[in-house]
Image (tube, rainbow, N blue to C red):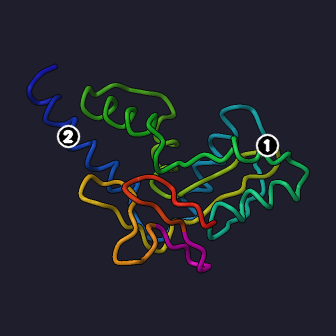
Amino acid sequence: MTKYQNRMLKVYRNKWIKIGFSTKPCNHKKAEASLKNIYKLIGLKEPKFKWFSEPCQLIEEAVKNGVKYKVALSNLIPSFADHNAAELDYWQNVFHLDLINVDYFIELAQNCAWYSPYKGLCLCCDRPKVIRVDKKQRLNDVDGKPAIEFKNGSTIRCKHGKYISKA
């Protein structure tokens, strides 16, 4: 790798960490446009979209629509943490590669927190209202406040990146 490519690796790493920890509202129109293009790419009809304020609601909706719980859980994709989008963004822009249709995935990752695609239906989730991390950028409760707070009031507690059970 050249010095420039190595330097840009840090720039893109920081860019995608910022995207991953963003609490900025999702742009539903941009996310849906990206998903419509992705569905079209794989030969599926444009889906209906349903948005939720946190991932548990999304999983519950999938189960309500006849999806088995384990399938719904494994089909939940955290788009902001999509390593493929981050890597493709880096390769496309630093190495000036003409990667076909990559922009759909990058745009999706920048505008949707989680999504769960099905035939005819795509369930999407907004970003959390608050995300707290420690100095090593691991999810972490701070001053008794939960690591993640969603707009509907639900929370996720973590201690240095490890989930803390409510029990």
**Residue 102 painted magenta:** no
Q: How many callouts does the rendering have?
A: 2
| Magenta residues, start to end | 148-155
Q: Nearer the viewer, mark 1 or mark 2?
A: 2
Q: Is residue 94 above or below residue 54?
A: above
Q: Is residue 86 left or right of residue 51?
A: left
User: Where is residue 104 drawn, in percent x and y?
Assistant: 52, 43
Q: Residue at x 69, y 38 (%)?
A: 40
Distance from Cα at disc 1 to Cα at disc 2: 38 Å
User: Where is residue 13 drawn, in percent x and y?
Assistant: 28, 42
Q: Residue at x 69, y 41 (%)?
A: 74
Q: Is residue 53 above or below residue 80?
A: below
Q: Residue at x 46, y 34 (%)?
A: 84
Looking at the image, tell me whether mark 1 or mark 2 is earlier in sequence order: 2
Q: Amino acid at mark 2?
A: Lys
Q: Is residue 89 left or right of residue 151?
A: left
**Quadrant housing residue 48:** bottom right
Name the element at disc 1: loop
**Quadrant housing residue 143:** bottom left
Q: Main secondary structure of the magenta part?
A: loop
Residue 45 image label: 1
Q: Quadrant of the C terminus?
A: bottom right
**Residue 149 painted magenta:** yes
User: Where is residue 28 drawn, in percent x and y?
Assistant: 58, 64
Residue 29 image label: none
Say which residue label 2 marks.
10
Q: Nearer the viewer, residue 97 or 164?
A: 164
